[in-house]
């Protein structure tokens, strides 16, 4: 068997590179354009691509690809046409579970930051306007005693729910909007009796905070649109750490400007790396640059899992963390 060749589309932390080097030859890029990725994937030079979630693998590209597998560095894989990959015998893997707590931490950071006007407060202080404590200065929204609505009660949604309960919040959820299914107490585990399942429309209308944790699919694209934003409380806060296109950003800008909702906290954006210009201008938009998993231990764990997937694929083995149709 010839020595496997791995293409890493952007630098990843250790131990990922060491695992790959021990198994074969490694070429690491500092990001790739769509044309560069196409040339690399169709050229027959590499066995496996260790990709980022920003690297798009369309059905057309996969039909021309001459690779064994795609090891995605991330839990999401909406950048890959998984059905087309399977059709052409190309394995796909991701890095589940390892980033649940890190992403949940950022969701709570966004929730608290948006509620307590952290962006505005920081800018106020840095601009030299602070003249001492004032009773009406930058008053935000209550968290303790408020109701958190979770859209998508998967691993990350559950991790957010546990943190919210620790903050004294009431938790309600919709399992997978817009089409829901009943969740058993066994599935809820330690959250049984502490989180209430409600229909999507009720979740939207009654939550003080709405946190999104759904995968990006045809059904969830623009799940939060102008209609949903109109039905939210005027005091509500929207949090998105899922995928950017789950929210219609143009509609969100309008809702924030017009006071339809109180604030939003976003770590993901509809057209990353571009951000809807209106969001950047709004003081009630608390924005982070997609750092949900950016904890040292988490990113190292993701690198290990992606590299282990890549090595298994290169050997013609089933990856330890597969994505299947």
Image: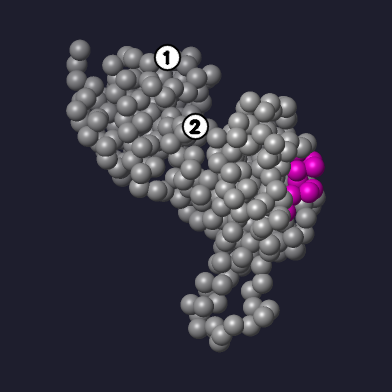
Q: Determine which of the numbered discs, if any, sits on residue 77 in the image.
A: 2
Q: Answer with left or right where residue 233 lies relative to residue 280.
A: right
Inter-mark Cα distance, 1 to 2: 17 Å
Residues at discs 1 and 2 in contact (Cβ within 8 Å):
no
The residue sitting at 48% across, 14% down in the picture is: 87
Magenta-tinted stretch: 200-208
Q: Is residue 321 visible?
A: yes
Work out whether 305 lies above or below 249.
Answer: above
Q: Answer with left or right where residue 308 lies relative to residue 265.
A: left
User: Please, what secondary structure does the residue beneath circle 2 have?
Assistant: loop
* Main SS category, magenta section: helix
Work out whether 66 lies above or below 268.
Answer: above
Which badge, 1 or 2, is on the more N-terminal residue? 2
* 212 or 197, nearer to the observer: 197
**Residue 39 in the image, given as x and y percentages of width and height:** 34, 31
Q: Residues within 10 Å of mark 2 (few under 14, many from 20)?
A: many
Q: Is residue 214 visible?
A: no
Work out whether 236 lies above or below 80.
Answer: below
Work out whether 54 lies above or below 316.
Answer: below
Q: Which mark is in front, 1 or 2?
A: 2
The residue sitting at 21% across, 25% down in the picture is: 23
Q: Which residue is mark 1?
A: 89
* 266 or 237, nearer to the observer: 237
The residue sitting at 63% across, 37% down in the picture is: 191
Q: Residue furthest bottom?
A: 131
Quarter of the image with the N terminus in it:
top left
């Amino acid at each position: 068997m010839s020595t496997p060749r791995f293409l890493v589309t952007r630098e990843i932390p250790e131990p990922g590179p060491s695992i790959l080097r021990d198994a074969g030859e490694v070429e690491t890029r500092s990001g790739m354009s769509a044309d560069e990725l196409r040339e690399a994937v169709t050229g027959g030079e590499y066995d496996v691509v260790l990709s980022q979630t920003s690297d798009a693998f369309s059905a057309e590209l996969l039909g021309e690809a001459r690779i064994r597998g795609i090891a995605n560095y991330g839990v999401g894989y909406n950048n890959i046409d998984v059905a087309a990959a399977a059709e052409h015998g190309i394995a796909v893997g991701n890095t589940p579970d390892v980033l649940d707590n890190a992403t949940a931490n950022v969701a709570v950071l966004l929730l608290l930051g948006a509620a307590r006007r952290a962006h505005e407060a920081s800018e106020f202080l840095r601009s030299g306007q602070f003249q001492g404590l004032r009773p009406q200065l930058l008053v935000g929204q209550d968290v303790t005693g408020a109701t958190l609505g979770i859209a998508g009660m998967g691993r990350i949604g559950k991790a957010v729910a546990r943190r919210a309960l620790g903050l004294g919040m009431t938790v309600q959820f919709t399992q997978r909007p817009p089409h829901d299914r009943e969740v058993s107490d066994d599935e809820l585990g330690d959250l049984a009796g502490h989180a209430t399942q409600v229909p999507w429309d009720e979740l939207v209308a009654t939550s003080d905070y709405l946190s999104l944790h759904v995968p990006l699919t045809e059904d969830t694209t623009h799940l939060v649109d102008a209609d949903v934003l109109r039905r939210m409380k005027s005091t509500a806060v929207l949090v998105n750490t899922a995928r950017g296109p789950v929210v219609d950003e143009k509609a969100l800008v309008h809702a924030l400007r017009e006071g339809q909702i109180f604030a939003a906290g976003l770590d993901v954006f509809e057209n990353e790396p571009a951000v809807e210009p209106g969001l950047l201008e709004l003081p009630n938009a608390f924005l982070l640059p997609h750092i949900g998993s950016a904890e040292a231990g988490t990113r190292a764990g993701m690198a290990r899992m992606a590299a282990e997937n890549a090595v298994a694929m290169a050997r013609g083995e089933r990856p330890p963390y597969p994505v299947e149709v």
